[in-house]
Amino acid sequence: TWSTKASMPKAMWGMVAVYDPKTKKIYVFGGCIDGSCTNVNSDVLVYDPVTDSWETKTGVPITRGAMAVFAPDDGKIHIISESFANCHASYDPDTGQFADEPAPPYCVRWGVLTYYKGKLYLISGTDPSAGQMVARLMIYDLATKTWGQGATPPFTGHGFVREWGWLNGKLYVIEWLDNSNEFWGRVYRYDPATDTWEFVGYTLYARDGPAGYMAKDGMI
């Protein structure tokens, strides 16, 4: 059954939300307060599922299309956004502080950002400098704080399904919008052990911007 929870302190679109397993809270960054995105959210909104309540913390302005993921290695939330000088910053839920992190080879919005075994994987998305969606795989090593590049994805797009699903050591990338404004309902699988991509199949719908979660039984 469905139930209605406490509303966010402000209405927005284009923000990014991350669950922190340490605090067991959800952190919301950035987003647009108006339709044209001239008014950008600069607060960090924190939701506590236990008390069903929101808290507003001091943040920084982050525009639409940011990506974020929690990294257990350093206990921080890593955010990719053109709003940062390096396109890459981290947020410490314990201190509420942001810090600059090493810049990726390319800055993108609305792509895939996911964590697996000490590394961040940044896939496809829209390159603001190029003005188009790109086919790239950038890999950040949290231990050495360095970026590298992996096998080129067999697709370009943005607005993929969230959250990014890892199953049996492989990443599943699902549904997106491409440069010709065509929606895709395909599923690709990436294996970091062999640095290879594989086409898996089709979804029921072609769309972008949906939400999803990879459960332990392999269902999304």
Image (spheres, rainbow, N blue to C red):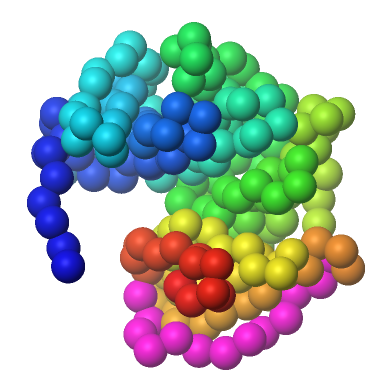
**Magenta part of the chain:** 195-207
Relative to 55, residue 137 above or below = below
Task: Determine whether 132 is above or below 39 in the image.
Answer: below
Front one among 122 and 152: 122
Q: Residue at x 24, y 21 (%)?
A: 55
> In the image, is residue 70 part of the stretch drawn in magenta?
no
Position of the N terminus by quadrant: bottom left
Q: Is 175 on the left-hand or right-hand side of 10?
A: right
Q: Which image quadrant is residue 13 in?
A: top left
Residue shown at the point (68%, 25%) measured from the top left: 74
Where is residue 46? Give x, y as percent: 31, 27
Q: Is residue 129 visible?
A: no
Note whether residue 90 is visible.
yes
Numbered marks: total? 0
Which quadrant would residue 194 be assigned to in this image? bottom right
Query: Left or right of 29: which side holds 87?
Result: right
Image side of residue 194 versus residue 85, left or right: right
Extreme-front residue of the structure: 50
Q: Nearer the viewer, residue 42 or 53?
A: 53
Is residue 205 rendered magenta in the image?
yes
Task: Name the side, left or right, on which 214 lies relative to 48.
Answer: right
Residue 96 location (% of width, % of height):
45, 13
Q: Residue at x 55, y 75 (%)?
A: 218
20 w.r.t. 199: above or below: above
Image height of 7 relative to 103, above or below: below
Kindly identify the residue that appears in the image at 27 percent across and 35 percent down.
Answer: 50
Quarter of the image for residue 146 reads: top right
Q: Residue 78, position in %: x, y?
A: 57, 32
Tell me residue 150's x, y (percent). Answer: 81, 57
